[in-house]
Image (cartoon, rainbow, N blue to C red):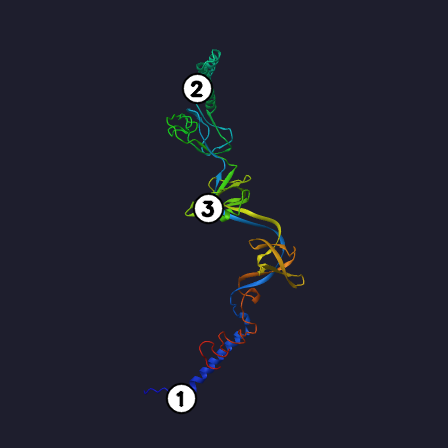
Amino acid sequence: MARRAFSWKFFRTWVLPPVCVIGGVALGIGFMAWRGDSSSAQALPTDASSTQTSTASFETIEKSVSATGTLAAANNETVSFDASGKVLSVDVAEGDTVAEGDVLATIDTLQLTADYESAKADYADAKAQLSNLEDEADGSDSSDAQIASAEANVTLKKEAVADAKDDLANAELVAPFDGLVTSQSYSVGDSVSGGSSGGSSAGAGAGGGATGSTTSTSGITIIGQDAWSVDVSLTASEVDLIAVGNQVTFTADDLDEFFGVVTDISALPSTTSGAATYPVTLQVTGTPEGLFEGVSVTADIIYLRKTDVLTVPTNAITTADGASTVTVVAEDGTEETRTVTLGEASGSLTEITDGLSEGENVKVTVFGQGGSGDSSDGEFQFPSDGQFPGGGQFPGGGQGGQGGGPQGGNG
């Protein structure tokens, strides 16, 4: 069967007109539907601002610098025997809580008692020798020299008695303050010498009966539980802001907020990785519970605190050419631009020292990201009449009935 040749005349006459009509009708219906339902138009989000009013009120303004540190017991001491002897008893173990004056351990007093009695006898002999020389003195240089030597010997013997008495008293090792035993190295039978401390690991534990033969350099360590400090490091600019006596607020994980004061600010910096910082000591005040050695804390050192100062939101203030103003909104809605004097600023608030009274309302500019809603909420929408911005034109100048981008035919 022969194929029929394509005919442009047939296409233009019977095909093209219906296609154009149908397409034009569809486009017109869609455009009219879009224009007739402006509520379905999507807002174009944009960064914008809105206004509201806020009441001038009295508040507390604070300024602070923050740093981190670790809790350390203010009282932390390792005690040891000053006398020599053999350990007879150990009365505490690690983890025990002790009170000031509690006996921690004791050493054998038999030798100490003998040393004390011997020292007293030597002292008595020295005094007797001095007395005899003084009775026999003839005023000669030799006599005077013997008396002077005897007097020096009496002094030495007297000091020896005092030392022996102290050693006897130190046979009992006592707690210097209330606290927690964090380490204990003595064992029954250990030998200690004056000035050294600790016991042999060969000995038994507290109350044990085994004997040891060597000594170590550790003693009994006690940390206080009622006084704590925190060491932090601040930059030079931060140190310039604070002073001894400033209040401190401490926060830490799993702990309630607690407080303190600045007790020491180093005048000399320390250098770490090329950066100079100044050590600052903070003392915890009160008796907060749950504090432990080595806990990490954040310290806010308050260097400025002003109470009952008149404040407004900082966004309510406009500053130009050195003058600051606020817009005061009266009860009837009328507005007045008023010059004010500013004080301190902290966070989102600024102090007003003159020009405004408590209870007056001021206009505040609120910045935010636009979303759905009217234009006062910072969003862009098509007008409710369904027209494009710019008098019915597409952006770029194309007429509503023409293609704004690719050229289209007249409708």
Q: CA distance from mark 3 to mark 2?
A: 54 Å
In front: 55, or 180?
A: 55
Cβ–Cβ below 8 Å for labels 3 and 2?
Answer: no
For marks 1 and 3, the one nearer the N-term is 1
- The amino acid type of the residue labelled 2 equals Asp
Q: CA distance from mark 2 to mark 1?
A: 140 Å
Q: CA distance from mark 1 to mark 3?
A: 92 Å
Element type where label 2 sits in the image: helix
Give the residue pinned by disc 2.
Answer: 115
In front: 249, or 237?
A: 237
Give the residue pinned by disc 1.
Answer: 9
Cβ–Cβ below 8 Å for labels 1 and 3?
Answer: no
Query: Are there few (<14), some (14-19), or many (20+) residues within 10 Å of tag 1?
Result: few
Q: Is residue 339 visible?
A: yes
In front: 163, or 385?
A: 163
Location of residue 24 in the rendering, given as x and y in whole percent from the top left corner: 48, 80
Element type where label 1 sits in the image: helix
Q: Of circles 1 and 3, which is in front?
A: 3
Q: Of circles 2 and 1, which is in front?
A: 2
Give the residue pinned by disc 3.
Answer: 277
Q: For the point 58% across and 48% down, which residue is it?
A: 305
Location of residue 347 in the rendering, given as x and y in whole percent from the top left corner: 55, 53
Residue 293 relative to residue 216: left or right: right
Q: Residue furthest top?
A: 136
- The amino acid type of the residue labelled 3 equals Thr
Query: Are there few (<14), some (14-19), or many (20+) residues within 10 Å of tag 2?
Result: some
Element type where label 3 sits in the image: strand
Location of residue 3 in the rendering, given as x and y in whole percent from the top left corner: 33, 86
For marks 2 and 1, the one nearer the N-term is 1
Query: Are there few (<14), some (14-19), or many (20+) residues within 10 Å of tag 3?
Result: many
Q: Looking at the rendered structure, which numbered label has been put on residue 149?
A: none
Residue 115 relative to residue 256: left or right: left
